[in-house]
Amino acid sequence: MSGSVKSYAAVDLGASSGRVMVGRVGPDSLELTEAHRFVNRPVRLPEGLRWDVLGLYAGVLDGLRAAGQVDSVGIDSWAVDYGLLDADGALLGNPVHYRDSRTDGVAEKVWATVPAEELYAATGLQYAPFNTLYQLTAARDTGQLGRARRLLLIPDLLTYWLTGEQGTELTNASTTQLIDPRTRHWATGIAARLGIDLGLFAPLRQPGEPAGLLRPGILDDTGLTGPVPVTAVGSHDTASAVAAVPAGAGEHFAYICTGTWSLAGLELDAPVLTEESRAANFTNELGLDGTVRYLRNIMGLWLLQECLRVWDEPDLGGLLRRAAEVPALRSVVDAGDAAFLAPGRMPQRIAEACRDSGQPVPESPAEVTRCILDSLALAHRRAVADAQRLADRPVDVVHVVGGGTRNALLCQLTADACGLPVVAGPAEAAALGNVLVQARPHGLVRDLADGRHLLTRTQPLTRYEPRGDTARWREAEARLARG
C-alpha cells in the first residue's frame, strides 16, 4: 500500500436525506467525518411525485465547499430513477419519484410481451413496480421521452453536471432490469422485445474507473483547487453499503442494509435465476469485483419514518424505550407488502392491517413502533432463511449496516428472530464503501477483502447474541401467513 493519507468526498444520497462525508484513508487508518447534511424532500406536482434534483445538486455543491480540498469525489444514491436530457444535454423536467403512481398496472403490460418467468431468467431482477424497465414502459408515449437523447441514472446525472462527462455505472445499471447478471452487460434481447432504446444509456462504467474532472466552474463554486477527479464508485448506495460489510476472511455471512429500505441477502459469485428464486422475489444485483448482491427488498424503516412524520415525535430514543416494554410479537404485518409503499396515514394503515388479520390493533405510538420493529425483524428472518435455502449457502452471522444499526432494539430483535449473532455497524456504510472504492486508484485499498479488513480494524462494531429460541418467531410467521 501507499504510505500517504488521502482525502475523499463521498456524496451519499438517500431517499430522505443527502450527505457529503469526508473519508481520510491511510495504510492502516480510515476516518469518516460529516461535512454537510441536507434534506431530500420530494415534491408533489400536478403531474405527480417528483425529485427536487436541483435542490440535491445545490446540497452537493454546498457539501463539496464544506469538505475542503479532496483527492477525489464519488457519488452514490438510491436506484432505478433517472433524468432525461435533450440533444443539447439539458434536463427535461424533474426526475420522477419511484413512489409515483405512473407504474401502477404497467408490469402486467410488460409480462404480456415478456412473461415474468422469462424476464427473471434473463435479468434476475425481482418484481418491483418501480423498476426502471417499468418506468420506461409507462413513459413510452410521452413527449418528454420522445425528445430525450440521453438517460442518466441519478448519480450519473450529478456526475455529468460536475464533470461534463456521461456514463452509466454498472451496479446501479443492474437495478434497471435491463442488465444480464451473467454477462454483466445489457440484456439487448429483452430491451428489443419491449421497444426500449438502449442507445439512450451512456456507456457502462465499472466501479473504480475515472468519471471525469470537476469542471472549472465547479472549482470556482466550491473553492477547490483542480484537478479534482470524480471516481465511479458503487453508485447504487446498497452496492457501496455491501462493500462496507466488515466481514472477516472466510466468514459465512448474510447482510442487512438498513435504512428507508431493508435489503437482506447474501454476496455470491454468480446469480440465482431459478423459478423458485423468482417466486420468492429475490433479486440479483451486481456488486463490486464480480460479485452478485442476492437479496430481497423489505419496506424497512420507511414504515417508522412515516409514522414519526405523522406523530411529530421529537424523542425517538424515548419512543424506542417505551416500545421495548410492549409485549413481543403481539401484532405483526408483512413489511414487504406493497400496500405500505405510498406515503401517508401509516399508523392507521398498520392498524387496519392488524385489524383485518384478526390481531390486536396497536393504538399508542409505542405499540405501533413495536409492531413495526417486530415485523421488520420477522421479515429479516424470512429473507435470511430463504436466501440460504435458495442459494444453498449457509451462514453463521448476520451483518447489519446502515442507519438501522443505531436502533439497538431492531438489531437485538433481528438476532432473536434469525437465531444468529448480529454484528451491527458501520452506520455510514454506503459512504464508507464509496470512500474505499475511491481509495483504490491511489493504492490504499486493493479489493473488497482488503477494504473489509481495514473496516474491522478501524470502525466501532456492536455484537448482539440471540436470546431464547426461535419458536415464537416461527409462530408469528405462521400467523402472518394465515392472515
Image (cartoon, rainbow, N blue to C red):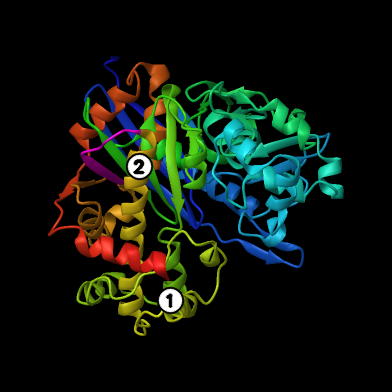
- Left or right: 150 as drawn, with respect to 320: right
Q: Is residue 135 above or below residue 5?
A: below
Q: Position of residue 400 (x, y in %)?
A: 29, 47
**Quick check: can you spot residue 177?**
no
Residue 357 colored magenta?
A: no
The residue closer to the viewer here, 102 or 430, is: 102
The residue where tag 2 is placed is 429
The residue drawn where x is 49% and y is 25% is: 207
User: Badge 2 local density, few (<14 within 10 Å), some, or many (20+)?
Assistant: many
The residue type indicated by label 2 comes to: Ala
Q: Position of residue 295 (x, y in %)?
A: 43, 42
Q: Position of residue 115 (x, y in %)?
A: 68, 42
**Quick check: can you spot residue 406?**
yes
Name the quadrant of the N terminus: top left
Name the quadrant of the C terminus: bottom left
From this viewpoint, which residue is outermost toward the bottom? 363
Quadrant of res 188 = top right
The residue where tag 1 is placed is 357
Q: Could you say whether the residue bearing mark 2 is in a helix, strand or loop? A: helix
Give, as a single range, the part of the protein colored magenta.
392-400
The residue type indicated by label 1 comes to: Ser
